[in-house]
Image (cartoon, rainbow, N blue to C red):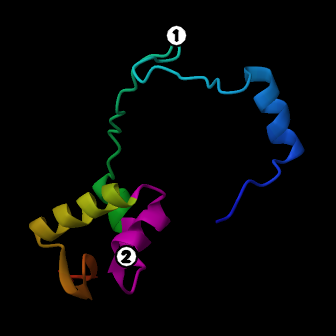
Amino acid sequence: MGGNRKKPAGASDKSAQTGPGQTEIKPAGEKKPGSKPQQKQKLAVTIEEPQGMKAIQGMKAITTQGVARNIGVKISVANAFIKSLEAKGIVKAEGGYSGHRVYHLIKR
């Protein structure tokens, strides 16, 4: 139906180097020499409570994303900090949906 098309000039140069009908096949299990297996890096970053409380004091709506942005940490670290504050009774979930919770500070 479609027939053969003329190959671009760059493709004809490549086929001339390997020869007609020859293709390079690399073994699937072969790795680069000198490469080491990658290890997952564990980051032990935590937010100290006085620093976190100072960041939360001025916020109207406390969200994981807002805390992470204010303190300069990853969202997972900020989420763990907010969850610990919620367990202590310092903040309370007020609204939100689908994992994007909005918290408010409980005044003591």
Q: Amino acid at mark 1?
A: Gly
Residue 91 lies, in percent from the top left, at 20, 76
Kind of residue at badge 2: Gln
Q: Quadrant of residue 9?
A: top right
Instruction: Say above or below: 15 vs 80.
Output: above
* Region of the chain picked out in magenta, as a range: 54-74
Q: Of all residues shown, which one is farthest toward the top?
A: 34
Residue at the bottom extreme, as displayed: 95
Residue at disc 2, secondary structure: helix
Kindly identify the residue that appears in the image at 36 percent across and 33 percent down: 41
Question: Does the magenta portion include 72?
Answer: yes
| Mark 2 Cα shell of 10 Å, populated few (<14), some (14-19), many (≥20) | few
Residue depicted at 40% across the width and 68% down the height: 67
Query: Of residues 14 and 82, which is closer to you in this image?
Result: 14
Q: On the rendered structure, is 18 left or right of 45?
A: right
Mark 2 — residue?
A: 57
Instruction: Return the mark for residue 34.
Output: 1
Q: Quadrant of the C terminus?
A: bottom left
Q: Position of residue 96 (x, y in %)?
A: 26, 87
Residue appearing at x 76%, y 30% in the figure: 15
Q: Is residue 38 above or below residue 47?
A: above
Mark 1 vs mark 2, CA separation in Å: 51 Å
Q: Position of residue 95 (x, y in %)?
A: 23, 89
Q: Residue at the location (35% across, 39% down)?
A: 43
Label whose residue precedes the other's in the sequence (1 or 2): 1
Which residue is more in the foreground, 37 or 58? 37
Q: Position of residue 59 (x, y in %)?
A: 41, 80
Q: Is residue 30 magenta?
A: no
Q: Comparing marks 1 and 2, which lies closer to the viewer? A: 1
